[in-house]
Amino acid sequence: MQIIDIKVPGKKYPAFVGENALQELRAILSERTYSKIMIVTDETVGKLHLQTLLNSLPESTSPVVYSAPSGEKAKTFSVYEKCLSFAIEAGLDRKACILALGGGAVGDLSGFVAATFMRGIHYIQIPTTILAHDSAVGGKVAINHPLGKNLVGVFHHPEAVIYYTPFLSTLPPRQIRSGFAEVVKEALIADPLFLKQLMKEAVDLTSMPNLPFYLKKGMEVKAAVVQEDEKEMGIRAFLNFGHTLGHALEANAGYGVLTHGEAVMTGMIFALSISRKQLGLQFPLDEFIQWIEKLGYEWRIPKEAGFEELLQWMKRDKKAIAQKPMFVLLKEIGKPVMEEADEKLLRECFYQLM
Ligand SMILES: O=C(O)C(=O)C[C@@H](O)[C@H](O)[C@H](O)COP(=O)(O)O
């Protein structure tokens, strides 16, 4: 089993990755005296994995279970309120703990509920997707606002991340693809050799013997960034590579139409294209695109997505300054910077990618 320690001011927590990770959860829950355990999951994951989780809890726990709608539908004000009402009615108090069993959306909802319920209680991330190797680490939790993705949120770190890799075996190819996009992002912003390795080895996303290693590498990249800049005052924003357009595409299409990873992959190609023009990035973009297309990414900007409309979403992005969209760009692979881009250049790159 792999253990990655995440250290932020005033807190250190482990991410356990591997086939024995659930034993670590049992140990944590046996050691701590939580007044009540509430599992938050979603309709899809609950059917597949809830029983495994229940079987691994200490006998003394009698958890209550809240099931949210699957995917981004979990991250609405109305589901947030329902989840809080459930917690209150179930008698949770300030010594209770939430277990977030699911992908990024369940993790975000659970973390936001945990952060705000009675001004903050403990929670533990139990990711079940590849995507959540990224979102479960680092304490960003949020719900969506009708005017933009993740616009309502806080930083609230989990007590631990329990990444039980057998859960990943039920993922459909589209979800594998979505999560793998964030691994590619971690390589692009931090590690040219890792990117080379991925482009050489990853040829079929349904058979990746090295996946646990890729996930660990990705989580290490993330942990190192978060450790240096917990609250995104500077370099943490580099983890948002591809997300300026990515979030806009997700929101504009209607949450759930595109997966997060599909939208981020398109956003990364957009950012790479801007980086080449604005910063002279030397990067074989065509070869990269050929690779990801072979992996099954349908990354093109949808014809019906208008530039003006997407620009409005990008202006409301959390990185925007005075309503000017900001982009994480690359000077070189592994050397990100945050920059504004001229609207004319944005438009040019945008239409090239349709
Ligand atoms: O943890 C971060 O910081 C990231 O930006 C990682 C992203 O991949 C992740 O999707 C995150 O939840 C997006 O955060 P947001 O601040 O852009 O909403």
Image (cartoon, rainbow, N blue to C red):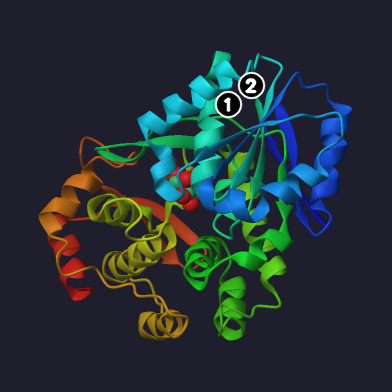
For label 1, count other residues whose C-alpha is less than 10 Å away and answer few (under 14), some (14-19) or many (20+).
many
Q: Position of residue 318 (x, y in %)?
A: 34, 39
In the rendered structure, the answer to whether residue 278 lies left or right of residue 74 reads: left
Place residue 36 in its image quadrant.
Answer: top right
Q: Are marks 2 and 1 in contact (CB under 8 Å)?
A: yes
- Say which element carries label 2: loop
Q: What residue lies at 27% left-to-right and 51% top-to-bottom?
A: 254
Residue situated in front as seen by the camera: 197 or 281: 197
Ligand 1 within 8 Å, label 1 CB: no
Q: Say which label, 2 or 1, has the lower sequence index.
A: 1
Place residue 322 in its image quadrant.
Answer: top left
Q: Which residue is mark 1?
A: 114
For label 2, count other residues whose C-alpha is less than 10 Å away and answer few (under 14), some (14-19) or many (20+).
many
Seen in the picture, residue 290 relative to 174 is either above or below; the reply is: below
Q: What residue lies at 80% left-to-right and 48% top-to-bottom?
A: 22
Seen in the picture, residue 290 relative to 181 is either above or below; the reply is: below
In the rendered structure, the answer to whether residue 311 lies left or right of residue 134 reads: left
Q: Position of residue 341 (x, y in %)?
A: 23, 55
